[in-house]
Amino acid sequence: MKKDSKIYVAGHRGMVGSAIVRRLQREECVNIIIRTSKELDLRNQREVENFFQEIRPEYVFLAAAKVGGILANNTYRAEFLYDNLMIQSNVIHCAYKYGVKKLLFLGSSCIYPKMSPQPMKEEYLLSGYLESTNEPYAIAKITGIKMCEAYRAQYGCHFVSAMPTNLYGPNDNYDLNHSHVLPALLRKFYEAKINNQPNVVVWGTGKPRRELMHVDDLADASLFLMQHYDGEKFVNMGTGKDISIRELAELIKKIVCYKGELFFDTSKPDGTPRKLLDLSYLYSLGWRHKIELEEGLIHTYEDFLKNQAGKYF
Ligand code: GFB
């Protein structure tokens, strides 16, 4: 990939896509192609065909997806399945049809079985039942992996898949019903502090563990794979360290300087008990994360205060 290559970032307005654009800009890439979902509905086969026929991108970062936390996944099951299947199928097929040199498909660590041995190796895929709350999303992402593999096998396409762990960072979603745990807790502790609320409600038991990777590390790893990896096997991407939801809540409480109590609402689902990724394959390729959780959390809270807090008041 060269600085003047035609690089399409699908999903550039999301947390992942915007981080990838920032990382490409740092590389002084001068031909980054982006389209909003109003300009190009990736669920619409004809629109995607017309876009690829006209623009002919050379490289594609497929970061567009319908994403959300445990409640959103469990509420909008049909949308999570349909939207993600349509987006990825249209983009992957047109990337083949219009000669894209290389495509990177981004999935999620929820593709692994709910009770998978930990840490989870890439070969554990499809070795057991999925977690029910995000099964539609997981099935869609597994299909994306298999589609990239099949297009490589039949047509020789240079399509690579990467499976990131739970992500956080600038431009995250802070809607309390649709977001993931980290942004939800940042906002909840912030609002509890400024409104002098006596406690903050944390969903579930607090016992599940999550591995949390800063999205700037993900963007760096994505560029690394696009430049240096062209294998059939998909690649786990993470930090190799996890934390319980209770410990995460305590850490965010400290960073926000909130003095009240935690209340665990066990009527809400815990979801997968643990989903720590095995990163030995990624490490063997030569990449490791740089941003540790506490440092990443502090920067993300600063970004929230600067760019997000005002939206809710
Ligand atoms: O981040 P999260 O929504 O998604 O939830 P998953 C992680 C854990 O945090 C669950 C708990 O055990 C939640 O019950 N939690 C505690 C909270 N308080 C909150 C809160 O206020 N909001 C939220 N959202 N959670 C997602 C999948 O699973 O992981 C997606 O549903 C995707 O498909 C994503 O794969 C990476 O980590 O459980």
Image (tube, grey):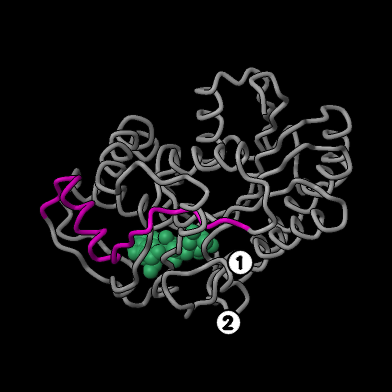
Q: CA distance from mark 2 to mark 1?
A: 11 Å
Q: Amino acid at mark 2?
A: Tyr
Which class describes the residues within 10 Å of circle 1: few (<14), some (14-19), or many (20+)? many
Nearer to us in this view, 194 or 240:
240
As for residue 297 lying within the magenta part, the answer is no
Q: Is residue 150 above or below residue 9?
A: below
**The N terminus lies in which quarter of the figure?**
top right
Residue at image point 24% right, 66% down: 246
Q: Is residue 25 above or below residue 256?
A: above
Nearer to us in this view, 299 or 173:
299
For residue 226, the mark is none
Q: Residue furthest left?
A: 259
Residue at image point 57% right, 35% down: 13
- Ligand 1 has an atom within 8 Å of the beta carbon of the residue at disc 1: yes
Work out whether residue 72 can be spotted.
no
As for residue 245 lying within the magenta part, the answer is yes
Give SS at disc 1.
helix
Residue at image point 61% right, 21% down: 29
Residue at image mark 1: 138
Start-end of magenta stretch = 234-259
- Residue 139 in picture, x, y percent from top left: 66, 68
Q: Amino acid at mark 1?
A: Ala
- Residue 57 in picture, x, y percent from top left: 77, 31
Give SS at disc 2.
loop
Work out whether residue 178 can be spotted.
yes
For residue 129, the mark is 2
Residue at image point 60% right, 64% down: 76
| Image-quadrant location for residue 180 | bottom left
- Figure label count: 2
**The C terminus lies in which quarter of the figure?**
top left
